[in-house]
Image (cartoon, rainbow, N blue to C red):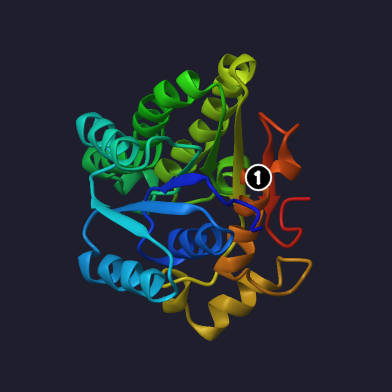
């Protein structure tokens, strides 16, 4: 029996990067996985096909996580298809970096909407079903930048810090219904985003990390899988840093 057999999981922003690694990890652990994407249609279809080839069922939904209506519709479709929703992973997010004095209001609003409002949208929609079930796991992907701040990322850091406060508040609200709410704060992860860095930039980055390397996406996904499992049955309202020691 796999760790998450019989469970239904929904991952936002699941077509690429950390989101894709989470989709694969939860699916491999036995969960029925649904995931959203905004623009990466070909990547989403490829991922769904990969899971089906392995004999795992997957649902891919095009959805703008910053839209409350679309979030509600997506959750309703998952529940209609599967009859339940046990795990929500709020992973969708974007960056639009720039120094504050040069940051447009549009870039501020866009990052806050995609990174923070999206967590509100999907958590509110999913919690209705989880409250009826009297069980559920909500796992929010924040960032170490939400704890430390970072020059040139005021919008991103604010959105990720907001997720931390949101996580702790909702954990207190939903705990009596056996709904556990936690956050994971990754450090620097090998993704398409960091792939554009020069060798000098990568070395400067890794010199700051006690483990002297960046993370792999599957290392973040492994902690998501743990928090979704029975073994994490008494953990809620926590922020777990997966950062190679960067913030200690």
Of 74 and 243, nearer the camera is 74
Tell me the quarter of the image containing the N terminus. Answer: bottom right
> How busy is the neighbourhood of tag 1: few (under 14 within 10 Å), some, or many (20 plus)?
many
Q: Does the image show residue 146?
A: yes
> Which residue is found at the position 61% from the left and 36% from the top?
182
Relative image position of residue 82 (x, y in whole percent) = 37, 42
| Local SS, label 1 | helix
Q: Position of residue 230 (x, y in %)?
A: 70, 42
Please state if 100 lies on the left or on the right of 199 as rendered: left
Q: Which residue is mark 1?
A: 227
**Residue 223: percent from the left, percent from the top?**
66, 54
| 203 relative to 36 in the view: left or right | right
- Percent position of residue 178, x then y: 62, 23
Instruction: Decide which of 169, 103 is in the foreground and name it.
Output: 169
Q: Where, by quadrant of the figure, is residue 26 drawn?
A: bottom right
Nearest the viewer among 188 and 83 is 83
Locate residue 17 relative to residue 244 in the image: left or right.
Answer: left
Q: Quadrant of residue 187?
A: bottom right
Above or below for 193 versus 115: below
For the point 24% across and 54% down, the residue is: 38
Residue at 68% of width from left, 50% of height from top? 226
Direction front: furthest residue: 1
* In the image, residue 93 above or below residue 42: above
């Amino acid at each position: 029996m796999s760790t998450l057999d019989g469970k239904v999981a929904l991952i936002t922003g699941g077509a690429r990067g950390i989101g894709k690694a989470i989709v694969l990890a939860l699916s491999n652990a036995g969960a029925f996985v649904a995931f959203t994407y905004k623009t990466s249609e070909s990547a989403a279809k490829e991922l769904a096909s990969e899971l089906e080839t392995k004999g795992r069922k997957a649902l891919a939904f095009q959805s703008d996580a910053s839209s409350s209506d679309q979030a509600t519709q997506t959750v309703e479709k998952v529940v209609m298809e599967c009859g339940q929703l046990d795990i929500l992973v709020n992973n969708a997010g974007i960056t639009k970096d720039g120094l504050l004095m040069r940051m447009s209001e549009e870039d501020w609003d866009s990052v806050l909407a995609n990174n923070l409002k999206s967590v509100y949208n999907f958590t509110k929609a999913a919690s209705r079903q989880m409250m009826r079930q009297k069980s559920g796991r909500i796992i929010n992907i924040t960032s170490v930048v939400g704890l430390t701040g970072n020059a040139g990322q005021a919008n991103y850091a604010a959105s990720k810090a907001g997720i931390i406060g949101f996580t702790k508040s909702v954990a207190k609200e939903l705990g009596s219904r056996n709904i556990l709410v936690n956050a994971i704060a990754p450090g620097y992860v090998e993704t398409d985003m960091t792939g554009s860095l020069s060798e000098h930039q990568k070395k400067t980055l890794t010199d700051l990390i006690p483990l002297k390397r960046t993370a792999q996406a599957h290392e973040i996904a492994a902690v998501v899988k743990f928090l979704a499992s029975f073994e994490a049955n008494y953990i809620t309202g926590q922020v777990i840093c997966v950062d190679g020691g960067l913030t200690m």
